[in-house]
Image: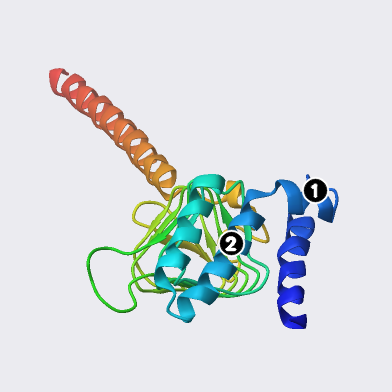
Amino acid sequence: MKEALKTLRNDVDVVLDQDPAARNRFEVIMTYSGVHAIWNHRIAHALWKRKFYFLARLISQTSRFITGIEIHPGAQIGQRLFIDHGMGVVIGETCEIHDNVTIFQGVTLGGTGKEKGKRHPTIEDHVLIATGAKVLGSMTIGEHSRIGAGSVVLKEVPPHATVVGIPGKVVMKNGVRVGNSLDHHKMPDPIADKFDELEKELSELREEITRLKSEGGNDRDHSAL
């Protein structure tokens, strides 16, 4: 009982730690749908482990209707999960979420087909998954990693990495790419970087063509003499 109360308190305290708009525990308990979804899931998961499958699914679907957050009762969730503005979040049956993970709205932790067994991702400690990201399949997202907004991740992500794009690519590891910034809205854009490279190459080609035309004109002038 004491351990359960500690878990419930952690679920509230992580909101106070992460969200500057949260003012007190009472407000979080009464108004935060992410907390409601997690608490409903903890009840549903306990029933799921005891093989009360229908009742567990009933609780999870009722919670989905009320909160807009769908967590399968079979998913395993650790301590201090923060679901911020959670509308549209989907967490699959065999997903494992470790401690101190942050998930924003529209995130899907799902599978890639009808495979059996472990088919959803494992999210290690201190991972941030930004708005609209999709993490699909049985893979591990390493600790302290960041998944950029709108990214689609289909492969393993090493610890202390930043992933952006479709499909997701590692663009920062151990702070090498973007210094000390870990804000999910300041992540690099590999597609924009590629366009910048193409624009630079086109500019160089234009300069080369202009130079060749100029040299060709000078050669004709000398021939006329």
25 over 121 or under it: above or below: above
Residue bearing mark 1: 27
- Report if residue 142 is visible in the image: no
Closer to the camera in the image, 135 or 206 = 135
At label 2, the amino acid type is Asn
Q: Residue furthest right?
A: 24
Q: Horizontal and vertical percent for residue 11?
A: 71, 65
At label 1, the amino acid type is Glu
Which residue lies at the image location 65% right of the left edge and 69% below the top edge? 100
Q: Horizontal and vertical percent for residue 57?
A: 43, 63
13 over 7 or under it: above or below: above
Q: Horizontal and vertical percent for residue 198?
A: 34, 41
Res 216 quadrant in image? top left
Q: Horizontal and vertical percent for residue 23?
A: 85, 48
Which residue lies at the image location 16% right of the left edge and 22% below the top edge? 220
Residue bearing mark 2: 40
Q: Which mark is residue 134?
A: none
Horizontal arrangement in the rendering, residue 92 relative to residue 182 (left or right)? left
- Which image quarter is the C terminus in? top left
Q: Residue furthest left?
A: 223
Identify the colour scheme used: rainbow
Which residue lies at the image location 58% right of the left edge and 71% below the top edge? 174
Question: What secondary structure is marked by label 2?
Answer: helix
- Report if residue 40 is visible in the image: yes
Question: What secondary structure is marked by label 1?
Answer: helix
Question: Which tag is nearer the camera, tag 1 or tag 2?
Answer: 2
Closer to the camera in the image, 157 or 93 = 93
Q: Residues within 10 Å of mark 1 (few under 14, many from 20)?
A: few
Closer to the camera in the image, 167 or 115 = 115
Q: CA distance from mark 1 to mark 2?
A: 18 Å
Res 116 quadrant in image? bottom left
